[in-house]
Structures are given as structure tokens and as C-alpha cells.
Amino acid sequence: MDRTPTGLNDSKAVIIPTYNEKENIEKIIRAVFDLEGDYHIIIIDDGSPDGTADIVRNLQKEFPDRLFMIGRSGKLGLGTAYITGFKWALAHGYEYIFEMDADFSHNPEDLPRLYRTCSVEGADLAIGSRYCNGVSVINWPIGRVVMSYFASVYVRTVLGMKVYDTTAGFKCYRRKVLETIDLDRIRLKGYGFQIEMKYTTFRLGFRIREVPIIFVDRKEGTSKMSSGIFGEAFWGVLGMRFRKIRPKA
């Protein structure tokens, strides 16, 4: 990763963690780059053995000033992948920093809606929400929908945070949010990371808005969800309730 973005003005970085996403990665990259608004992409690849990183390297020849990649040595957790991307994006001057999955469960065409919610409507964090306008999930088994929905109910009850989709991973941050959060003190690595980041943003007094989206389960590749991820989130939320949260010194 030896390229640095240039000419950043109102700049937008989309962070996409990957592990074995060869079926999706080129399509998602091209879909984002087809959007108006000069979005840049930062891939965080955790040593995918299926050749995902090789596909990205080939595409970097076509998009040398818009596509960047950080390769890591193994599966180190979703949270640490995003934090690695956050730190890189902050160091390179991006103003709006997005999280998005590689598998098209998040529709790239919703990126401008999240961006406008921050840049025009004044939110500090815009969340692509499955649950703020009923339940908008396609192709999930009913058991998984129920588990996810009531996980957010549990989080709202325990933490007192008025966010309907607390585990959502489709988001846009203003850089000042990520500059204020002490990223080195974020503890959870799985989907609990998504809760912890929202709760930290909430406790630090930033403005959070939910933007309704339709979430479509992946059509290609393999889900990374596991029962351990939910267990970490369940107990981690209890710990958050009693933790002091301070801005970065």
C-alpha cells in the first residue's frame, strides 16, 4: 500500500473489510466507483486465502488514486479491521468515513443518502438502519431476523440509547467523531464493536440519525456470523453500561 490520495476536498472514504470475498469484491468496488461523488475505497483484507487481495491489487492498476488496501496476516476481528481503516483514513485527511460490507447486503446506492444525512442534514453519524421503519430485511431466516431485532431492543433497554438498529454495520461518520473517540480503548472485536462505537458516539454527545435501508442477505460467498459473536455482544453491552467514556486526550 504505497499510494496516497491527492486533492481531497469534502473527501469520502469507504472502508470495506474482507475475508474470502473473491465472488463479490470486484463487483462491489466497481459499484461504488460508478456513483457520483468521487468515493474512495480502503480494503482491509485479513489474509484471504481465496485470492481476494490479488483481485484488489489488479484493480488498483485501474484506480490508482481511489482504491487502497491494507493487508493483514490473519483473521483479527471486524472491529480491529475497521479501527485500522479509521486510523488510515484520518491520517490521510478524509472528512466522511463509511463502513460497508463487501457482499452487497449494503446497497452502494445508499451511500449518497448516508453522506447527505451528515453533510447536508447535520448528523455526525448516519446509520443505514434495518429497523427504524419497521423491519426491512430480505432473505434472512426468520430466526435470524428475530435474534437481530431483539438484540437491538436489548441494547436500547440496557444502554438507554435511542437507536433502533444498534448492530448495523452500514454507517457514515464525520471525521470529528472518530478523532474524538479514543479508538485504542474500543474493546469489542465482533458485532459488539458496532454497538460499542454507536454507544461511544452517543455518550460523547454527537448527533446520530438513522436512515432506512433495505438489507439483503448475501447471494455469494459465506457469512462470517457465529454464535460467539452474539455472546461477545451480549456480555459486552452489560460492561458498557457501567463504563466511563471520555473523549480522546
Image (cartoon, rainbow, N blue to C red):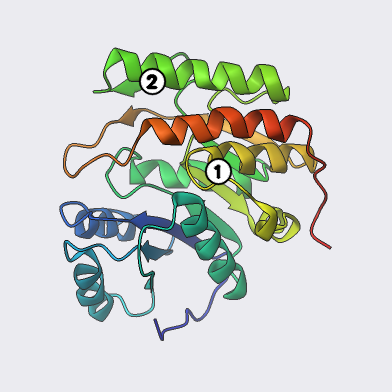
Q: Residue 193 carries which label?
A: 1
Q: Which residue is drawn at 33% across and 40% down?
A: 107
x, y percent for residue 219 = 17, 37
x, y percent for residue 197 = 62, 44
**Is residue 48 visible from the viewing direction of this image?**
yes
Amino acid type at mark 2: Ser
x, y percent for residue 227 = 39, 30
Residue denoted by label 2: 136
Direction bottom: furthest residue: 2
In the picture, measured across the screen, residue 174 lies left or right of residue 167, that is right
Q: From this view, report whether residue 207 is shown above or below residue 152.
A: below
Residue 64: image quadrant is bottom left
Residue 135: image quadrant is top left
Count neighbours of disc 1 (C-alpha within 10 A) and say few if under 14, some if 14 to 19, many if 20 or more. Answer: many
- How far apart are the alpha carbons under marks 1 and 2? 22 Å
Decide which of tag 1 and tag 2 comes sooner along the chain: 2
In the picture, measured across the screen, residue 149 lies left or right of residue 29, that is right
In the picture, measured across the screen, residue 65 lies left or right of residue 142, that is right
Q: Which mark is residue 162?
A: none
